[in-house]
Amino acid sequence: MCEHPYTVLVTGGAGFIGSHACIALQEAGHHVVIYDNLSTSHPLVIERIGEITGRVPIFVQGDIQDRARLEATLAACHCNAVMHFAGLKSVSESVDQPLTYYENNVMGSLVLLQAMASIGVRTLVFSSSATVYGIPQELPLKEDHPLSATTPYGRTKIIVEEMLREHFNTCPDWRIAILRYFNPVGAHESGLIGEDPQGKPNNLMPLISQVASGKRPHLNVWGNDYPTPDGTGIRDYIHVLDLVQGHVSALNHLNDPQCIEVNLGTGRGHSVLEMVRAFERISGQTIPLERAPRRDGDVSSCYADPQRALDLLDWRAQRDIDEMCRDAWNWQVSNPYGYSKKDEHSVAQLLAGEACAPDSLVEFITPERASSPLGFQSV
Ligand code: NAD
Ligand code: UFG
C-alpha cells in the first residue's frame, strides 16, 4: 500500500489498458474516478473492476473535449492526479480519418490539460506509444531516439508529447510522465477483463485469439521476408498487467516536478511465428496461417531499451510470452463475445439447445434462425 494515496482521474478507464490500470491503482491503495465516453468500450467493465477489487470505481460518462464536465469532475471528486488513456488508437483508421484523430487525441488532450490547469491538478501520466520512434534507426530503442511519424495516429502522439514538454517549460511545477508503450497484450488473470476490440481487430494478439477460437479461419502473416531469423516481424510484446504496474510506479515517482519520457517494454523481441507457436502450445489449438504481403507502414523489428524505466521507476516487466498467451486465451474463452455480446451468446447457447429467455432474445433472431427448432418469430 502506498503512503500517499492519490485520487486519480483515469480518462479512458473503461478501455483495455485503462481498466487494468484502475485495478492496479486500487490494489496499490489509490482511489479511482473513471472518465470515459464509452466510444470504444462497454460499461460492464466498471462492474468487473469492482468484482476483481471489491470496490466499484466512480464512473463519469463524459468526453475529454468537454472542459466544463472535466473541471466539475476533477473538483467534485478532489482528484489530484490524472492518468490519460482516452484516445483513438487504430493506425489504419487514422489514415482514413485523420481529422477525427487530431480532434479526439490532440484537441481532447489539450482540453484536458486546460481543465487540469484551471482546477490546479498538476500530476499527469500520459499514454504514448513506441510508434513515435517511426522507423527505428538503432535497436533497442532508447528514449532519445529521434521522433517521427508515418501515420496521423503516430503524429497525434508526437504532438501531445510536444505539447506536454512545452507546457512543462512554462509551468515547471507540473509532474508529467510520458509513457511509451510497446505492444501491450494479455489480460487480467481472472478472465473478467481483457481486450474487446470493436469490429475486426488490427493487432496480432486479438486476431490470433479469434483464429484459435474458430471465429476466423486463418491468420494472415503480413510479410515473411523481413531481415529477421524467421522472416516475420519482431515486436516487444508486454503483458498488460506489467504495463499498468509501470504506471503505478510512474505515479509513485512523480513526487517532484519533472517531465519524463519512459519506454514501457520488456526489451525482448518476438516474431509473429514465435507468438503463434506460443499461443498454439498454451491453447492446444491449431492456428492456420496464410502468407500475405507486408502491411504498409510496418517496420521489421521494434523493441525497447527498458533501462530508463528500471533506473527511474524501479520497474521492469516480469511476465513472459507464455503468460501473455495464457491470459489472452483465458479471456477469449471466458468471454467469446467480449463484454457486449452477452445476448448473442445466449442466442448461440439457445440455438445449441441450451436454456431460454425468449422475450429478451427475439430481437437477435435473424430470419434464417427463425426456422430453428426453437421456433422463434423473426422480427
Ligand atoms: P481502448 O480503445 O481500449 O481504450 C480507450 C478508451 O478511451 C475507451 O474506453 C474509449 O471509450 C475512451 N475514449 C476515447 N476517446 C474518448 C474521448 N474523447 N473522451 C473520453 N473517452 C474517450 O484503447 P487502449 O488499448 O486501452 O489504449 C489506451 C491508450 O493507450 C490510448 O491512448 C492508446 O493510443 C495508447 N496505446 C495503446 C496501445 C495498444 O496497443 N493498445 C499501444 C500504444 C499506446
Ligand atoms: N501481424 C500479422 N498479421 C496480422 C496482424 C499483425 O502478421 O493479422 C504482424 C504485423 O505485421 C507486425 C506484428 O504482427 O509484425 C504486430 O502487429 P500489431 O498490429 O499487433 O502491432 P504494431 O507493432 O503494428 O502496432 C502496435 C499498435 C500501435 C502502436 C505500436 C507501438 O497497434 O498502435 O504497436 O509499438 F503504435
Image: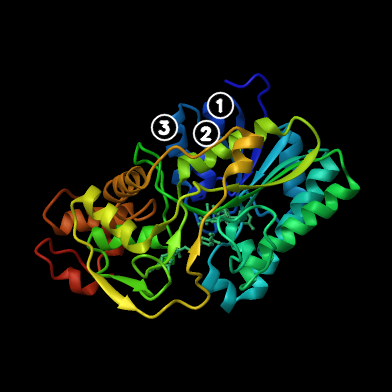
What amino acid type is highlighted by mark number 3? Glu
Callouts 2 and 3 close, C-beta under 8 Å = no
* Residue with the mark numbered 3: 51
Secondary structure state at the residue bearing disc 3: helix
Q: Identify the residue at image location x=51%, y=70%.
A: 299
Q: Identify the residue at image location x=81%, y=36%.
A: 257
- Residue 5, located in which quarter of the rendered image? top right
Report the quarter where the N terminus lies. top right
Percent position (x, y) of residue 143? 66, 52
Callouts 1 and 3 close, C-beta under 8 Å = no
CA gap, disc 1 to disc 3? 16 Å
Q: Identify the residue at image location x=32%, y=45%.
A: 322
Q: Identify the residue at image location x=19%, y=50%.
A: 356
Q: Is residue 173 visible?
A: yes
Q: Which of marks 2 and 3 is in front?
A: 2
* Residue with the mark numbered 1: 28
What amino acid type is highlighted by mark number 2? Ala
